[in-house]
Image (tube, rainbow, N blue to C red):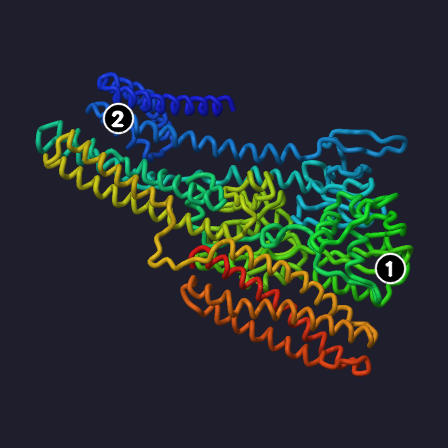
Amino acid sequence: MAGLISDRVLRRLLAGIALAGLVLGSSAWLLGHVRLANGIWAAGTIPVIIGLAVSIVRDLLARKLGVDAVAFVSMAGALTLGEYLAGAVIAMMYAGGNLLEDLAVARAERNLSQLIDRAPRFAHRKDPASVTDIPVDEVRVGNILLVRAGEVVPVDGSIQSAHAALDEAALTGEPIPVTRTKGEIARSGSINVGDTFEMLATTIAGESTYAGIVRMVSAAQTAKAPFIRLADRYALLLLPATLLLAGLAWAFSGDPVRGLAVLVASTPCPLILAAPVAFIAGVARAARSGVLIKGGGPLEALARTRTVLLDKTGTLTVGGARLIAIEPAPGEDANNVLRLAASLEQASHHVVAAALIAAARSRGLALQVPDHAREAMGSGLEGVVDGKHLKVGSYQLVCGPTALTSWAARTLRRASWRSALSIFVAVDGRLIGAILLADELRREAPRAVQTLRTAGVSRIVMVTGDRADAAETIGAALDLDAVLAERVPSDKVEAVTTEKKRSPTAMVGDGINDAPALAAADVGIAMGAGGASASSEAADVVVLVDRLDRVAEAVLIARRTRAIALQSIIVGMSLSGVAMLAAAFGWLSPVAGALTQEAIDVAVILNALRALSPPMKRARRPSIPQSVVRTLQQEHQDLRLVLDRLREIADRLDDAAPAEVAVLITEANRLVTQNIVAHERQDESGIYPRLAEALQDGHGLAAMSRAHREILHLARLLGRLTDALRESDVDRYLTRDAQRVIEAIEALVRLHNAQEEDIYEHAAAGG
């Protein structure tokens, strides 16, 4: 370790010397002190040459040869010929590149240290007479351990208490805590979000789940080969070719100056500068889009990617609990159910509480301050709201051991179909409703998947710790190539390893549980908008904005950047080859060769800097203002409340009395006519003509107009059912028909709005 530290210090010192020499020498030259400038440039170059010589000797002993050898000959030749500025520039680029590599290694080490710091250090061992705190390394299989509220489970073990509420987000990525019962496994790294529970240790600390995550991250980062610079791939050809040509020029002409002229003309600045400049420009270009690419190596790996593995929670989905439905009991009001539940949940810091409060406030519901609130950790709360005793939580907490009613059974069944968490609400012992919470697909996810395929990614796979039914539903919606569900971190690493054998592979994730897979992939991409995490540190690329489509944009930027770098290298070295031949035949003196090489260097750098700008478009169509897009998106947000109410009405029709059926169908027709139909007609007549000007073709809008016609058709069917509707007309057939039409409208409008928003954003970007 001491040797590693001294090497890093030396590299930083050399980079500082090279930079100081370049800056101070340039200042002296600008002030007219040419001899002083040359001396300063030489003083800044010589230490780098010495350090480089030592490095070359080490590489030769290890049977390696790269562009470092070309840089050594170039710097030495530049000083020999008096081209001190060229030597200083080459020295700065070489020393700066080494410094960037050191920073990348240090970042990886910080990631590993953060994982280790989070690991529990102590455990509470329960003995017959007392509870003793012991180092986690002293835990033995068979020990009875206490895990208190808020603590991290220290080792894997079997739960001995009746139940335990665990936040397993660090392991599975799922944000909603789960309840484990007696005999089930509590895995290390999980957080106890319920009451204190007992567990029987089944592993020691070194063999536990969380320790395995740390080991996998460490092993994957150690095994990952360092980035081989593009320049090194040409070094084995360039160095001997340069020396041979210089020797031949000297031998045939008898003039050593010709050999020196060849060396000057061969200065490998296109090799040394082209790739770093292009990659730095590409990194800067990605940063403008909110994507942090940690250097040239990850950028090149991203450019070669052909397979992308995507985590589900927080990557394809928004990664949190969201209200998806309110199931009021017969005769109850949905908004009142949500208002009472959210009022009581103000006394809790649980992720479910935050979701309920946010949903209530988005609907403009006035919340009351709860009294005498008491939380049953992990299962719910009870307290007083509006003078009524309220219980909010699991069915077991709210209703106890009583048998399920048909309504409650149907609610739990619907929650299961939607992979949702059900929160029941009871007032003074009477069940008034349930609230369904679940994660939801990111709005931009379909477009992001399509863009990845357009960018050249041939295989897209979802790998998640979630249940198979929830994962496969999303996989089908996005038309993914494969879905790997119920995968623990080690399974994700195995999936990455398998895909890497087929083609260059990227892994996209956002949780601690994804860190090993991110480290194992050719390029790891972290959704880091939620803040710093182990996944962000383990990843090579971090998406700093909460948008999945930035991943596809990063791939496109990386591929264009790599193409520009290769173009700069090939064209630059071809021009250098021409200059070398001219020098060998005596057509270029050393001074003229140096000037020619400088011109080539400038051209190469300017070309490499094209990676900083977006590709030019043949014809840029007019875009629509972002303010218009925001207005349209706000209108869609307002429509979501209408669609939520339509879903509630469709659910209520299951067991409503005839009089209530007539009222509900009439309300649904009013909502559809006044809100949805009016909105779609306004889009068709006012917005679509403007969109047509901003898009390259009208096929997308034609499909959107077709959806408008289908929505209007369904609205007319609902209107016909509602016309002159009387209670005596209501039978199970009319109820069923109305329910189907309402559900069709609700589902179609949600899909249609999502597609429209994709088109709006595309048009706002200029088509």
Q: Mark 2 or mark 1: which is in front?
A: 1
Does label 2 or label 1 sit earlier along the sequence? 2
Report, in whole angstroms, how far the alpha carbon at label 2 lies from the one at label 1: 83 Å
Query: Is residue 124 among what the camera can see?
Result: yes
- Would residue 328 be found to the left or right of residue 443 on screen? right
Quadrant position of residue 731: bottom right
What's under tag 2, amino acid-wise? Answer: Leu
The image position of residue 668, as x and y in percent, is: 71, 71
Nearest to the observer: residue 519 or residue 86: 86
Q: Which residue is found at the position 68% from the left and 81% from the top?
A: 720
How many labels were placed on the picture?
Answer: 2
Disc 2 target residue: 85
**Are there few (<14), some (14-19), or many (20+) residues within 10 Å of tag 2?**
many
Secondary structure under the numbered disc 1 in the rendered image = strand
Mark 1 residue type: Leu
Residue that numbered label 1 is attached to: 431
Q: Answer above or below: position of 382 versus 124.
A: below
